[in-house]
Image (cartoon, grey):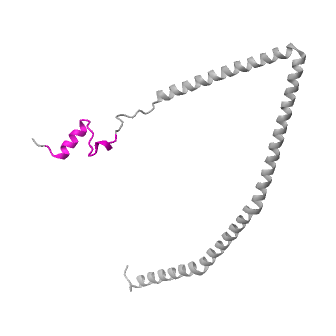
Amino acid sequence: MRHTKSEKLENDATLGYTVCYNHSMAETQPSTSTLPTAQDAEREAERRNRQTSIALVVSALIFIALVALAVFGLTRDAKVTETIRDIFIIFLALESLIIGAALVILIIQLASLINLLNNEIKPILDATNETINTLRGTTEFLGQNLVEPVMKLNSYLAGLQRMLELVGLKKK
């Protein structure tokens, strides 16, 4: 029994052979695709919750250890406590200077934004409003001088057509 070429290709494809005229260019396709299931999603959510809980517990333990170390260190010697206090005050002063500089930069940026809005955006909006008003006037003019006469003519012609149909000069 002889098979045609297309039957042979179909048989080869069903048997798992790659049917391609150029085997070096043949693309391999994955046999099955694995899609995440609801159970996988539950496991992933449970794993994330566990990691979050562990991170919170470790963070709390580190915070408690730092507080205990600070209390222990500050109660040991008054001279060390004064030095730490002075360093902390200097740190807060530097932080205040940085925040002040950031606020000055923010105010300058806000002033430049207001300038941009007043000098560049507002004229564009004014020109747009003028264009819209011109278009509104144009549509009103066209409505009165073009559309209304055409509608009147159509209504007169429809009335004339109906009258001719009633008289019997024109058939429906």
The quadrant the N terminus occupies is top left
- In the image, what residue occupies the spot 66% across and 23% down? 56
Q: Tag count in the figure?
A: 0
Which residue is at the far left?
1
Question: For the magenta stretch, what is the residue range?
Answer: 3-27
Residue 59 lies in the magenta stretch = no
Q: Percent position (x, y) of residue 31? A: 34, 34
163 relative to 32, above or below: below
Q: Nearer the viewer, residue 167 or 15?
A: 15
The answer to whether residue 72 is left or right of residue 46 is right
The answer to whether residue 138 is left or right of residue 5 is right
Residue 13 lies in the magenta stretch = yes
- In the image, what residue occupies the spot 72% across and 67% down? 126
Q: Nearer the viewer, residue 64 or 129?
A: 64
Q: Percent position (x, y) of residue 170? A: 38, 84
The answer to whether residue 4 is left or right of residue 43 is left
Quadrant of the rendered image containing residue 116: bottom right
- In the image, what residue occupies the spot 62% across and 25% down? 52
Q: Nearer the viewer, residue 133 or 102?
A: 102
Q: Nearer the viewer, residue 148 or 128?
A: 128
Q: Percent position (x, y) of residue 67? A: 78, 19
The answer to whether residue 154 is left or right of residue 50 is left
The quadrant the C terminus occupies is bottom left
